[in-house]
């Protein structure tokens, strides 16, 4: 999992990145609104953690810009503002969740998982995609009820495809998301893992969008 963190506080940002890393979650950290991307088409990011009070702008303005550009990447707003109106503004403006500082890292991780579960249209911790079932927290996948013997990287790849079943996931996005340190995995390595994964779950379950990426067939 690879996140975009937009947070200006140096100490808080460092601590949060470290806490995420211990959970196997990599992140790119930006401290200014002007450094944020215009949109997230074919994004490498699973989710955005967005602070509202930035030195050169307001997080609400970034959020509005992304949603006007039809960016669908999940966004969790982080702020010290606890007022009802701020929460309503954020949620009505397209935020997927809202968490008030200070917060426990465990709560943030749980909220990230819940947001990504909703994004993948899964109602529980056990995801169902056709005959496949996946339990992300247990690193367990089954096909027709039988446990699959997947390597850690194969499981990671299957999970990333399962977040958007039926949709093309770009190779570039997979390249970034697959490495826990946030360093891109080369396309040749991804192709090897895709080949191994097809052998274990059935070639018909993963289609290739030539020159773009891969689709997990529901």
Image (cartoon, rainbow, N blue to C red):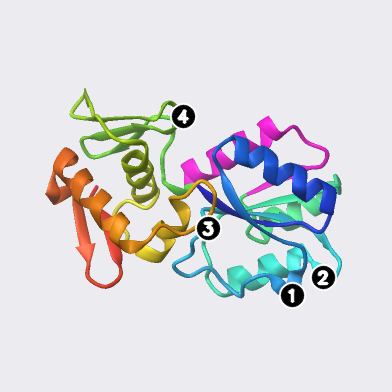
Disc 1 marks which residue?
34
**Element class at badge 2:** strand
**Element class at badge 1:** helix
Disc 4 marks which residue?
137
Across the whole image, how many numbered discs are drawn on residues?
Answer: 4
CB of mark 1 within 8 Å of CB of mark 2? yes
Upstream in the sequence, badge 2 or badge 4? 2
Question: Which region is colored magenta?
Answer: 97-118
What residue is at 30 percent from the left and 64 percent from the top? 213
Upstream in the sequence, badge 1 or badge 4? 1
Label 4 crowd bin: few (<14), some (14–19), many (20+), radius 10 Å: few
Disc 2 marks which residue?
57
Say whether residue 67 is visible. yes
- Asked if residue 210 is positioned above or below residue 204 in the image, the reply reads below
Upstream in the sequence, badge 1 or badge 3? 1
C-alpha span from label 3 to label 2: 22 Å
C-alpha span from label 1 to label 4: 35 Å
Label 1 crowd bin: few (<14), some (14–19), many (20+), radius 10 Å: few
**Element class at badge 4:** helix
**Element class at badge 3:** loop
C-alpha span from label 2 to label 4: 36 Å
183 or 107, nearer to the observer: 183
Say whether residue 170 is visible. no
Give the image location of residue 217, x and y in percent: 22, 51
Label 2 crowd bin: few (<14), some (14–19), many (20+), radius 10 Å: few
Quadrant in the rendering for residue 30: bottom right
87 or 80, nearer to the observer: 80
Upstream in the sequence, badge 3 or badge 2? 3
Disc 3 marks which residue?
45
What residue is at 81 percent from the left and 53 percent from the top? 86
- Asked if residue 32 is positioned above or below residue 83 in the image, the reply reads below
């Amino acid at each position: 999992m690879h996140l975009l963190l937009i947070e200006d506080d140096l100490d808080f940002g460092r601590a949060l990145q470290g806490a995420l890393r211990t959970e196997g979650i990599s992140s790119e950290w930006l401290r200014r609104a002007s450094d944020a991307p215009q949109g997230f088409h074919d994004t490498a990011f699973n989710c955005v953690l967005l602070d509202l009070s930035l030195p050169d702008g307001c997080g609400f303005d970034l959020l509005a810009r992304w949603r006007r550009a039809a960016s669908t990447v999940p966004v969790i707003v982080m702020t010290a503002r606890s007022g009802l109106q701020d929460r309503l503004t954020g949620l009505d403006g397209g935020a997927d969740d809202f968490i008030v500082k200070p917060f426990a890292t465990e709560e943030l991780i749980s909220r990230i998982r819940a947001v990504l579960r909703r994004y993948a249209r899964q109602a529980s911790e056990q995801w169902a995609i056709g005959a496949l079932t996946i339990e992300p927290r247990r690193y367990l996948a089954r096909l027709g009820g039988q446990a699959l013997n997947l390597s850690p990287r194969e499981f990671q790849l299957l999970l990333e495809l399962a977040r958007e079943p039926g949709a093309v996931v770009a190779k570039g996005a997979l390249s970034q998301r697959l490495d826990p340190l946030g360093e891109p995995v080369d396309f040749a390595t991804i192709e090897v893992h895709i080949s191994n994964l097809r052998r274990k779950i059935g070639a018909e379950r993963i289609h290739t969008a030539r020159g773009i990426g891969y689709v997990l067939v529901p």
